[in-house]
Amino acid sequence: MNQKVYIETYGCQMNVADSETVAAIMQSKDFFPVVSISEADVIILNTCSVRDNAEQKIWNRLDFLKGLKRRKKNLKVGIIGCMAQRVADKLLEHEAVDFVAGPDAYRSLPELVSESDIDLTHINTDFNTNETYSGIVQYKYDENAISGFVPITRGCNNFCSYCIVPYTRGRERSSSYVDIINEVTDLRDKNYKEITLLGQNVNSYFFEDVKQSVDFPKLIKMVAEAAPDMRIRFTTSHPKDISNELIDAIASYENICNHIHLPVQSGSNKVLNLMNRKYTREWYLERIEKIKSTIPNCGLSSDIFCGFSGETEIEFQETLDLMNIVKYDSAFLFKYSVRPGTAASKNLTDDVPESEKVARLNRLINLQNQISLKKNKADIGKNYQVLVEGFSKRSKEYLFGRTQQNKVVVFPAENVKRGNFINVKITDASSATLKGIIINN
Ligand code: SAH
Ligand code: SF4
Ligand code: F3S
């Protein structure tokens, strides 16, 4: 009988895509992916290490699974993803854990599960810089899904001093553009309406074969042309590498969404330098100006964190000041969490007290809420194309979808369904969502 496998995903969109790849690998070896934990014979946690609290969540979850295993004797539990790579041995010591696989070792998962039956080595954290999981068609849990992730690069070579990702994901590699286009056209044929090209730094995509060499601007144009009726998104862009050519491509293709996620991390040159981000505040602001002048009404979002080593009150204020200049539509805001093994953990002192980190984080959140509210209010009266995603969480009388700028819009449900592109006039706004009414459908 097929064993049922349940995968729980933590962390970033790359992990969401990887979980679908893992489900496909498991299915090809006679496992059956399920969506309810109570049915599972095998539970896999796809984990994140980016901040300490991401790892704490997993330790807590494992304590819960230990209890579940007592009640269900044959249940197996595996850990994959970034934390599996970082602390494999420690994880395997936990009573609940049967097998561990790092991000480049997913093809060996079916074997690892069977090996854990007979107590052989059930750990694989080998890096494989050639692994792009090409040729694997991701398993789709939702047959009616309309949007999907397509990884285009894996790993990272940037070594921002605070960041664990280069250590957990290994060196950067790009998938073949042929595989990427195949995946995109496959999703198009399955009626998908939106895809997001994924990588830690999509701008450094580069693939060369006998026919041609393809960089990111070229790739995104090929994708946009292969699926003219689909929305194309991408994330993440590293500010040091965002080129005029890419900005021009977004402006000239109707189906490449007018939204750029461009994480700044800090507004202070001293801090950016300590972070090894390889750009200055002035460079970043110039890129933002270029985006604003080339793509009118471009949605802008960012990642920012406070309390990095050496960040003084003055330098923190430079971050607030930059946020006031750029006016992001939304931002992911964090406080610094030291990651063992990174350059910052070795060479810098974590010298901003926790209470000060919390206070600064609250100031970031308050400011961004004010900016988001102002920007959303400025949308009132405007019309936007919205891709309908489903019913609003609060009421079946309302649907929700997103604008190209990646803003969520809620509107009364009438004669439209998931996957439709509609025009909506914005009538109200909060800091998190827009409200609107459907026009001329
Ligand atoms: N590759 C992407 C995102 C990587 S992780 C990029 O370069 O932008 C997502 C975000 O987590 C980062 O942008 C950063 O804001 C945050 N982050 C990464 N390491 C962190 C740490 N040690 N402490 C706090 N936040 C961190
Ligand atoms: Fe981490 Fe920097 Fe790479 Fe992003 S670019 S994953 S922040 S090292
Ligand atoms: Fe987390 Fe790894 Fe993604 S550390 S953010 S799951 S690349």
Image (cartoon, rainbow, N blue to C red):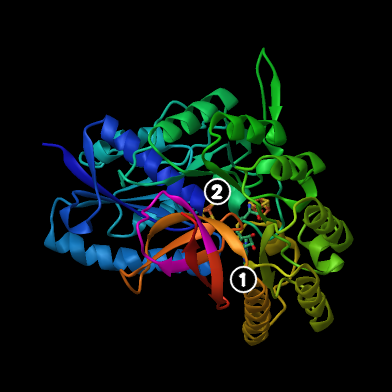
User: Pointers 1 and 2 in contact (CB under 8 A)?
Assistant: no
Q: Magenta span has 421?
A: yes
| Residue 148 in view (yes/no) | yes
User: Position of 290 compared to 149: left or right?
Assistant: right
Helix, strand or loop at mark 2:
helix
User: Position of 415 compared to 367: left or right?
Assistant: left
Q: Quadrant of the N terminus?
A: top left
Label 1 CB, ligand 1: below 8 Å? no
Q: Residue at x 56, y 76 (%)?
A: 429
Q: Which quadrant contains ligand 1? A: bottom right
In the displayed structure, 22 sits above or below 96; it is above
Q: Where is residue 92 shown, x and y percent of the image?
A: 36, 53
Q: Nearer the viewer, mark 1 or mark 2?
A: 1
Helix, strand or loop at mark 1:
loop
| Residue 157 in view (yes/no) | no
| Dot 2 crowding, Cα within 10 Å, few <14, some 14–19, many 20+ | many
Q: Quadrant of residue 174?
A: top right
Q: Where is residue 434 shown, x and y percent of the image?
A: 53, 71
Bounds of the magenta segment: 410-424
Residue extending farthest to the top is 210
Tell which of 133 and 417 is nearer to you. Answer: 417
Which amino acid does the dot numbered 1 rest on? Gly
Tell which of 142 and 390 is nearer to you. Answer: 390
Q: Where is residue 358 shown, x and y percent of the image?
A: 62, 83
Disc on res. 381? 1
Label 2 CB, ligand 3: below 8 Å? yes
Which amino acid does the dot numbered 2 rest on? Thr
Q: Which residue is mark 2?
A: 168
In the displayed structure, 210 sits above or below 222; it is above
In the displayed structure, 424 sits above or below 314; it is above
- Cα distance in 3D space between marks 1 and 2: 46 Å
Residue extending farthest to the front is 440
